Image (tube, rainbow, N blue to C red):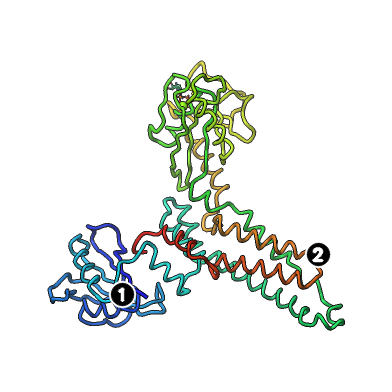
Amino acid sequence: MATIFALSSGAPPAAIGLIRISGPAASAALRQLAGRLPEPRRAVTARLRDARGDTLDRALVLWLPGPANATGEDCAELHLHGGRAVIAAVEQALLACPGLRRAEPGEFTRRAFVNGRIDLAEAEGLADLLAAETEIQRQAALAMAGGGLSRQVAQWRDELLALSAAVEATLDFADDDDVAAQADCSTWNTAGLRAALAAWLARPRAEALREGFRVVLAGPPNAGKSTLFNALVETEAAITSPIAGTTRDVVSRPVAIDGVPFLFLDTAGLRDDSADAIERIGVERAAAELARADLVLWLGPEAACPPGAWDIAAQCDRADADPKQAPRHRLSARTGAGMVDLRADLVATARAALPRPGDAALNMRQHRLLAQAEAALGRVDGQTDPLLVAEELRVARVAFDALLGRTTTEDMLDALFGRFCIGK
Ligand SMILES: Nc1nc2c(ncn2[C@@H]2O[C@H](COP(=O)(O)OP(=O)(O)O)[C@@H](O)[C@H]2O)c(=O)[nH]1
Ligand SMILES: [Mg+2]
């Protein structure tokens, strides 16, 4: 096993450059550079030298022997002065140490996973935590990285094992007619476990959190969609003009409002009589976006408002604006009238539809595996053959194991840990 090292702090120059080392040769490398091995888990200052004895830096160093640490291997940390040349020189000295090489993206975390320091759901949470840009993303990722889902799945798995034991007890005695006749099917009751799984499956998904709550602006040309879009995303992202058909493609912008992630999408006006081929494609794309939206803001005539969409009376500062009867919001993106109310309504609606702050949200992989487990448990219902019941329970357990990463494939791990940066 190679010993890896990487700069784990941000790009130099910075106040401090943190280099992490992990692997069997970590102690030898630290001894080589610092001249000695400090007491475990105690920060000490040391003069780091290269092979010729020239000073590289005066640094804070830590010796963190495995297995009770982040990666489960022997680790060392060098807290250097964060200049480019300092870091480059220390990296060169480390490369000269036998058995050391630069780490690949996510390799420290991957070793933590391989050594059982974290499970797969926690690693996924960690990846999300590093990618989190808004407050609500951070809270959900922290819940996942902290093992919220893992603890729950481990508990379900225990319940499942107890059920399997009860079923297999009847199997062992299957030849004995008396015991088989008395096999108590009620102990195979999976309803409680299924209900718990169903509740998790019904929760909002992690992807919605990662990509933001999708709000599509729709309506005929010149309704004021692009102007409202620009006001919502607070930049001039979309071109506005009195010329119908100005917006031809879908323009999207992610923004956070009050810590809630949104993805706003401006679309070409929905008219089907356009002679312009490019605009027609834009109209088709708009229709596709409407189908994928979490919410549609409708700026067209009241009677044509799609089901579930919010009817918006836009351009209310204009005397000739459509005076809608009962719009959800009456506003002017130009003057700002009504915009505070619209934003507050959007935030409240998205908050309710996204995972609750601090709740671990299932990602697609986790959702698929839990759904498999739930389906297998469903097939146990009404089943009286202990052999078939035992098999379904095994299917459910395999799904739980896959969720926690007890069974994984290399390419799946490559995909996950490739999302991390180098040094994590
Ligand atoms: N007075 C006023 N004019 C607006 C408002 N919103 C849009 N407009 C104007 O209406 C025209 C069409 O707006 P635009 O946002 O491009 O509409 P879209 O085709 O639906 O994207 C432009 O000339 C805008 O300046 C508004 O709230 N008040
Ligand atoms: Mg437009």
52 shown above or below 136: below
* Mark 2 nearby-residue class (10 Å; few <14, some 14–19, many ≥20): few
Callout 2, which amino acid?
A: Gly
Answer with left or right where residue 59 lies relative to residue 124. left
Residue 211 rendering spot, x and y as whole percentages: 48, 47
215 shown above or below 321: below
| SS for dot 1 | strand
Q: Nearer the viewer, mark 2 or mark 1?
A: 2
| SS for dot 2 | loop
Q: Write the residue at 18% across / 64% down.
A: 86
403 shown above or below 243: below
Circle on res. 76: 1
Circle on res. 382: 2
Name, please, the residue furthest toward the top.
320
Q: Quadrant of residue 195?
A: bottom right
Circle on res. 213: none
